[in-house]
Image (cartoon, helix red, strand yellow):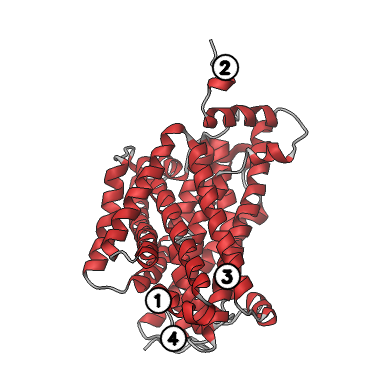
Amino acid sequence: MSTPPAQLGISERTTLAIGEVVARRGVGLRDALLFAGPAMVASIAYMDPGNFATNLQAGARYGYSLLWVVLAANIIAMLFQALSARLGIVTNRNLAEMSREHFPAPVVYAMWGISEIAAIATDLAEFLGGAIGLSLLFHLPLPIGMVVTGLVTYCILMAEKQGFRPVELIIGGLIGAIALSYVIELLIVHVSWGAAAHGAFVPQLPGSGALRVAVGIFGATVMPHAIYLHSGLTQNRAPARTNAVRRRLVRFSNREVIIALTLAGLVNMAMVVMASAAFHAGHPEIAEIETAYHTLTPLLGAGAAGVFLVSLLASGISSSVVGTMAGQMIMQGFVGFRIPVWLRRLVTMVPAFIVVMLGVNATDALAYSQVVLSFALPAPMIALVILTSRRDVMGPFVTRRLVSIAAIVGTATILALNAILLLQTFGVGMPGLPAAG
């Protein structure tokens, strides 16, 4: 005997409603909202504290000139998140599981190792971001802020016991807070929109230091854990027993990716624009979140500084939740077991505490963690391109040649940037860019 809909949980009711929607032709706005969730959750990875660090440095040091990097990274991110979601919908498996099934064991273990390093770097950035926000907003010592961030994250993750929908709604609310904060910031600062448009569409790298920041932006925007996570969020979210249903789910998923990541991209660009407008002309040396906060108060008022911290806090908490979810999915997919949430959270906290105890600058740690992520990116990107291009995996949903070429170009771009950064780091001069001193 089936359970009456009124007695089902919110996640079960959502799944049931999605099944009814895909079975009919007409879809209204309320129906479309049922499909909002996976891309929205994944998009928080594109607004995490690592983005705050790299975007702050990009805007303060180089003005609007690196906005094109944010735009390019966001376009690449859209493509790969759409491919990840498609893989989950079509196969009912996530990227880590499919990699374990289709690649040789040495490759699988290498991917797992790289992905775990990326997960640690991700969680370090997100955890530190929340702790910095709490520390500045409530005048707490940074270690206490870290403990509070860990506890809040754990409490939100407990909502996952009720299914996928409560976490999606919580993350959605926090994303709304971040977006609203930057709308307010842009209304406060004086923006040169002409210069911003030029920086967004005319590629340029003003100096060797800009390359590291650019690679950091890619690492903070196209996130390894988000690529893994998206396939897991779609794999069992809605029933897909026929190719016709899968086709409609993929179509809805693509639309959600475009909307969610456009919003994330606009928030990222707003971060750079705000930092450029507030700091570039008079305070280009500002590269730390704490300094930016204290400088915003005399420049734009306590309200602007407070809004900045609220957005950072919302970003740190929400992305910490998403990072833990992704870490669990990666571990379970590659090696077939999961660990308790509290233990995963504790393992994540330890590197962050070590960074603080060693006296490492928190914002620098955030920025460099994004460079680490950029070097970890090619593994899931290459795996996703290979799997979604295989007809024995995707059947009639195999990616078209043009899409595969675009994905290969995106992966090659990341690899090229990483190679240039390595050469520059070891003192090899590049045409138009001096070697790093």
Residue wearing tag 2: 4
- Three-letter code for the amino acid on which mark 2 is drawn: Pro
**Disc number placed over residue 185 in the picture, else none:** 3
- Three-letter code for the amino acid on which mark 4 is drawn: Glu
Q: CA distance from mark 3 to mark 1?
A: 18 Å
Q: CA distance from mark 2 to mark 4?
A: 62 Å
CB atoms of marks 2 and 4 within 8 Å = no
Which residue is at 51% across, 63% downward? 221
Which residue is at 64% across, 35% downward? 246
Q: How many marks?
A: 4
The extreme right residue here reads 26
CB atoms of marks 2 and 1 within 8 Å = no
The x, y position of residue 244, in whole percent, is 69, 32
Front in this rendered view, residue 163 or 75: 163
Front in this rendered view, residue 184 or 430: 184
Query: Circle 4 sits in a helix, a strand or a loop, which is it?
Result: loop
Query: Circle 3 sits in a helix, a strand or a loop, which is it?
Result: helix
The extreme front residue here reads 302
Q: Earlier in the sequence, mark 2 or mark 4?
A: 2
Q: Nearer the viewer, mark 3 or mark 2?
A: 3
Which residue is at 55% across, 43% downward? 87
Q: Earlier in the sequence, mark 3 or mark 1?
A: 3
Query: Circle 1 sits in a helix, a strand or a loop, which is it?
Result: loop
**Disc number placed over residue 285 in the picture, else none:** 4
**Disc number placed over residue 288 in the picture, else none:** 1
Q: CA distance from mark 4 to mark 1?
A: 9 Å
- Image position of 372 (left or right of 31): left
The x, y position of residue 214, in whole percent, is 50, 74
Hey, which quadrant is residue 63 in on the image?
bottom right
Mark 1 Cα-neighbour bin, 10 Å: few <14, some 14–19, many ≥20: some
Do we see residue 420 in this rendering? Answer: no
**Disc number placed over residue 399 in the picture, else none:** none
